[in-house]
């Protein structure tokens, strides 16, 4: 019987740099404060966060990669829904009467710290653009 290596459960090392560079560009576009950036990334230790920010590279865990993936999907959906990029970037900060948000902004929902809230906002936007 030949032993085969188990599939890797760790994310590919090469994804950290592109994911972080995309995240920090997004954070700048959305005018996110440092505390908000850390919360969206899953509250990494301050030293880790600043190392990521400084080098725009690093090995990321699955949770962090998943979070960045949802954020990029949210960004893309907003760009499709709002042809004006300023309007698309501002939507996140505006109070929203949809039951999902209860009068709060999508960003407030996303800042709960739960990856599920990023997923829900992404799903909401995909449904708004008819992609569900």
Image (cartoon, rainbow, N blue to C red):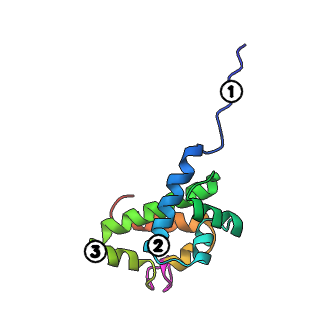
**Residue 26 drawn in magenta:** no
**Which residues lie in the magenta part?**
95-106
Image quarter of the N terminus: top right
Q: What element carries label 3?
A: loop
Q: On the rendered structure, is 112 left or right of 104?
A: right
Residue at image point 55% right, 59% down: 56
Judged left or right of residue 105, residue 55 is: right
Q: Which of 55 and 130 is in front in this view?
A: 55
Select label 2 or label 1 by which is in front.
2
Residue beneath disc 1: 5
Give the vertical position of 17 relative to 92 (above or below): above
Q: Which of marks 1 and 3 is nearer the N terminus?
A: 1
Disc 2: which residue: 28
Percent x, y for residue 103? Answer: 48, 86
Q: Position of residue 25 (x, y in %)?
A: 46, 66
The residue at which mark 3 appears reads as 84
Looking at the picture, how far across and down is residue 89, in whole percent? Answer: 39, 75
Q: Of tags 3 and 2, which is closer to the observer?
A: 2
> Measuring 46% from the left and 67% from the top, which residue is drawn there?
26
Residue 53 image-quadrant placement: bottom right
Q: Earlier in the sequence, mark 2 or mark 1?
A: 1
On residue 31, the disc is none
Going 48% across and 77% down the picture, which residue do you hit? 106
Instruction: Give the percent coordinates (x, y) of residue 11.
Output: 61, 45
Instruction: Note whether 58 is above or below 10 in the view shown.
Output: below
Are dots 3 and 2 in contact, CB under 8 Å?
no
Q: How far apart are marks 1 and 3 (CA)?
A: 49 Å
User: Could you say which is closer to the camera, residue 54 or residue 110?
Assistant: 54
């Amino acid at each position: 019987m030949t032993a085969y290596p188990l599939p890797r459960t760790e994310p590919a090392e090469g994804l950290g740099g592109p994911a972080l560079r995309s995240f920090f560009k997004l954070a700048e576009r959305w005018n996110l404060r440092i505390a908000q950036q850390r919360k969206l990334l899953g509250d990494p230790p301050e030293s880790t966060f600043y190392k990521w920010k400084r080098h725009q590279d690093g090995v990321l865990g699955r949770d962090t990669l998943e979070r960045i993936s949802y954020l990029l999907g949210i960004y893309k959906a907003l760009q499709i829904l709002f042809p004006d990029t300023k309007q698309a970037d501002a939507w996140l900060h505006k109070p929203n009467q949809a039951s999902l948000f209860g009068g709060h902004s999508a960003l407030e929902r996303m800042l709960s710290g739960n990856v599920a809230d990023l997923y829900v906002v992404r799903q909401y936007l995909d449904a708004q653009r008819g992609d569900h």
